[in-house]
Image (cartoon, rainbow, N blue to C red):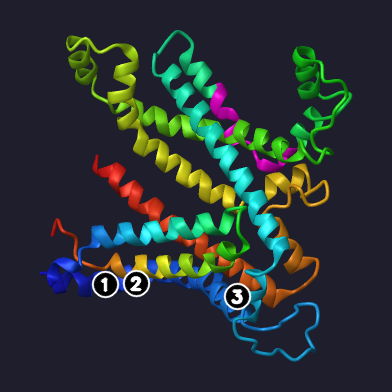
Amino acid sequence: MKTWFIREIWENVASLIIILGVFMLLQPFSMLLYTYSFSLILGGTLGFVVVSHFPSNRD
Amino acid sequence: MKNTLSKSQGLSDRALTWLFVTPTILLLLAVNIYPLIYAISMSFTNFYANKPGREIKFIGLKNYIRILNKEDIWETMQATAHFMFWTLLLQAIIGLGLALLLKRNFKGSDILTTLIVLPMMLSPAVVAVFWTYMYQPQSGIFNYIINYFFNFGEFTMIGDVKLAPWSIIIVDTWMWTPFTMLICLAGLKSIPNYLYEAAEVDRANTFQQFLHITLPSVLPFLLLALLFRGIENFKMFDLVVELTGGGPGSTTELASINLKREAFEKWRTGYSSAFAVIMFVTIFGLGNIWVKVMNKVKER
């Protein structure tokens, strides 16, 4: 159970969500992607702040 | 003994720490935290700063929904993306190339490094003013050099709809490539020589050494520099405003320029606060990734 809360893994997931959100915000292909981009960036950023308090697998 | 010392000095270590830290905390609260919280609260209202008598209504997420469904804002985001993509690509290629060149420590490399780094030290306003002169269609040295080699005839970089986005890309690349170069140079100098010696023993050619030793070692440094420049260019304002003013039309109107227009020309404070919050959260998110990458680079 404890292995689920590893900082490194979840930080990577949150980083990917942020990068995906930034791509959606800046892409020139679809208005729909642009509309939902901020939700992803906000979710990823808040997620990053939360998971950065998880214990590291080096601890 | 400790108590005696503390009593004789009047203040405990803890109290002394708070005495030094409190002014900084108060200043940060007043200058950073309070305006941020105020802007976030304003982003949920229909507040206009030029209409102080008007009733301020709470309108929930309406400002955010408007921004994220408006094609004009989407277009400014695309202009920002175009600017970011090309500046980052050019700065990565030229910066890494210059770093590889300067790593060789040839005669005069120190002076060359100083000369290359000079643009980075100038104020963006100064850079924009003298590039405006360099871009002059009749007397500008940039146009003269291009015409000398390619003979395009008379053209204007800042006034042309197709060329204006490239004019800001060229100036930003000229100004900030030295930054990428310096970070890459630091990365290159941290590669131990025995790796290259071992590769030579294994008969690896120069390209193989670059591909398997230099590039993997310098990549985290390059990524760090690009992430930093990406954050800076996402909120780019001064250089572009001074150089093109967002024009011609709105071809070089980046997100931050549009934000300034909404806030201080149309005075839509609530709406522009929501726009500012969107930009802030994006930069904050990217900043978190930047810190993470930086920590990884430090560990290496």
How far is mark 1 from mark 3, CA to CA?
34 Å
Which mark identifies residue B39? 3
Q: Determine the secondary structure under disc 3.
A: helix
Residue A17 visible within the image: yes
B186 displayed left or right of B113: left
Q: Are marks 1 and 2 in contact (CB under 8 Å)?
A: yes
Which numbered mark, 3 or 2, is in the foreground of this view? 3
Pointer 1 residue: B14
Q: Nearer the viewer, residue B140 or B63?
A: B63
Q: Residue at 44%, 55% (x, y): give it.
A: A19
Q: Which residues are magenta?
A: B115-128
Name the quarter where the C terminus of chain B is drawn: top left
Pointer 2 residue: B18
B273 displayed left or right of A41: right
- Report crowding for label 3: few under 14, some 14 to 19, many 20 or more residues within 10 A (C-alpha): some
Q: Are marks 1 and 3 in contact (CB under 8 Å)?
A: no
Question: Are labels 1 and 3 assigned to the same chain?
Answer: yes
Name the quarter where the N terminus of chain B is drawn: bottom left
Q: Position of residue A25 (x, y in %)?
A: 56, 59
- Report crowding for label 2: few under 14, some 14 to 19, many 20 or more residues within 10 A (C-alpha): few
Q: How many marks?
A: 3
> Counting residues from the N terminus, which is met first, the one under dot 1 or under dot 3?
1
Residue B259 visible within the image: no
- Report crowding for label 1: few under 14, some 14 to 19, many 20 or more residues within 10 A (C-alpha): few
Q: Residue at 42%, 66% (x, y): give it.
A: A45
